[in-house]
Image (cartoon, rainbow, N blue to C red):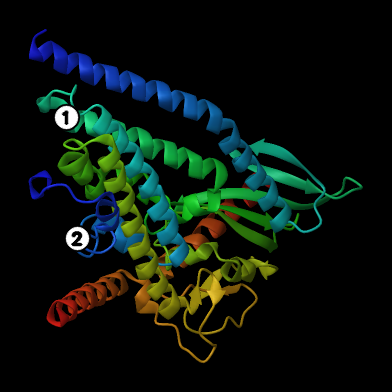
Amino acid sequence: MSERGQRSSFAEFTKGFWKENPILVMILGMCPTLAVTTSAINGLTMGLAVVFVLTGSSLIVSIIRNIVPKQVRIATFIVVIATFVTMVDLFLKAFLLDLSKALGPFIPLIVVNCIILGRAEAFASKHSVWRSLLDALGVSFGFTVTLIFLGGIREILGMRTFFGRSVLGEGFEPWIIMLLPPGAFITLGFMLGAKNLIDRKMKERK
Amino acid sequence: MSNRMKMILILTLFACISGGVLSLVYLFSSPLIEANMLEERNRSIFEVVPGVKTYEEKMQDDLAYFLCKDESGSVIGIALPVQGNGYQGVIKLMVGLTPSLDRITGMAVLEQVETPGLGGRISEKSFQEQFNNISTHPAVEYVKNQEPDKENQIKAVTGATISSRSVVAIINKNIQKLSSVIQ
């Protein structure tokens, strides 16, 4: 990415929301994306946990990028990432027990989330602290927004609620399948399709 | 310094820093986590045995339970913490019983890792409340896709029969165990 020349700071931050969206473009971190998005609040919590882990680890990785020998860089990055993930896990258990239970094993599993290691290896280990910070914030908030969308659609159609508040009347029969794993794949498929359709229309207009 | 030494040093350094940071976070959060767990236990006991004022922990033949008393100190029920396998992992429950064990007064799910949105819905109030005041003679049963019509029946969560069945099986097994221990 560095060979493409310097982007503006603003573009570095916003690219994670659309142009390099981790879910819709890079198709990374599919495991938590598909598994926890049964409701909007689960998506939001998962997303914020990733914001903390990704920002923290990108910051550290960027700071230490010149002192870590090439051969042990992945091991070092994983130690850094695992530290942040364990912190989030303990924090959720201490302050938000119910959400921690709802997300189950997927918080500890952030350790192996490709987005985190991917950004550390592809970006933070090659860029300055400031740009790594922007990149991490953009990508992780892009991840969060996409998860809320995905969780929101599944929650509305599967349980008639959005963030726990009733939005569709009693007359609407909930689509249980939206809460099942196939519902995640179906919704994600439509979101990917919609993203590509919008991109194509925008290109045509130019 | 040779590259090999540098590799070892750097990795060791980061592992140590990580260990140190996590010990600090753990030191700070573990009392909170423990308090959460205890509070949850208290809350679940008060929830499953209505009217309880104090409780006393009992241990008989490896089976722990809580003897629940009202203001005057007479026993009004028993809270039994139970656990067993669900669909994906261990389900932990608190079951409230009358002193004679012939009725369930309430049930609360303490921990489960069932599929979110499916088996996970055993944690929802509407599922747990079905256990209020049901009979344990004969043993508790579940029904699917219909409303329960007997005194010992509950309705399984739609699409999550295994989780519902596990909850019922865990409860029945442990009530049996408790009754053989107490009598």
The residue type indicated by label 2 comes to: Ile
Q: Is residue A26 left or right of residue B171?
A: left
Residue B120 drawn at (x, y percent)? 46, 63
Residue found at x 19% / y 42%: A123
Same chain for mark 2 and mark 1? The answer is yes
Q: Which mark is residue A189?
A: none
Q: Residues within 10 Å of mark 1 (few under 14, many from 20)?
A: many
Residue A50 drawn at (x, y percent)? 36, 49
Residue B122 drawn at (x, y percent)? 51, 64
Of the residues under marks 2 and 1, which one precedes in the sequence?
Answer: 2
Q: Is residue A162 left or right of residue A85?
A: right
Q: In the rendered view, would you say A62 is above or below B5? A: below
Q: In the rendered view, would you say B145 is above or below A46? A: below
State the residue in front, A57 or B91: A57
- The residue at which mark 2 appears reads as A27
- The residue at which mark 1 appears reads as A73
State the residue in front, B107 or A145: A145
Q: Chain of mark 1?
A: A
Marks 2 and 1, how far apart at CA:
24 Å
Residue A103 drawn at (x, y percent)? 42, 54
Q: Is residue B46 left or right of residue B9?
A: right
Name the quadrant of the N terminus of chain B: top left
Q: Residue furthest top?
A: B1
Q: Chain of mark 2?
A: A
Q: Residue furthest right?
A: B72
Visible in this render: residue B14? Answer: yes
The residue type indicated by label 1 comes to: Arg
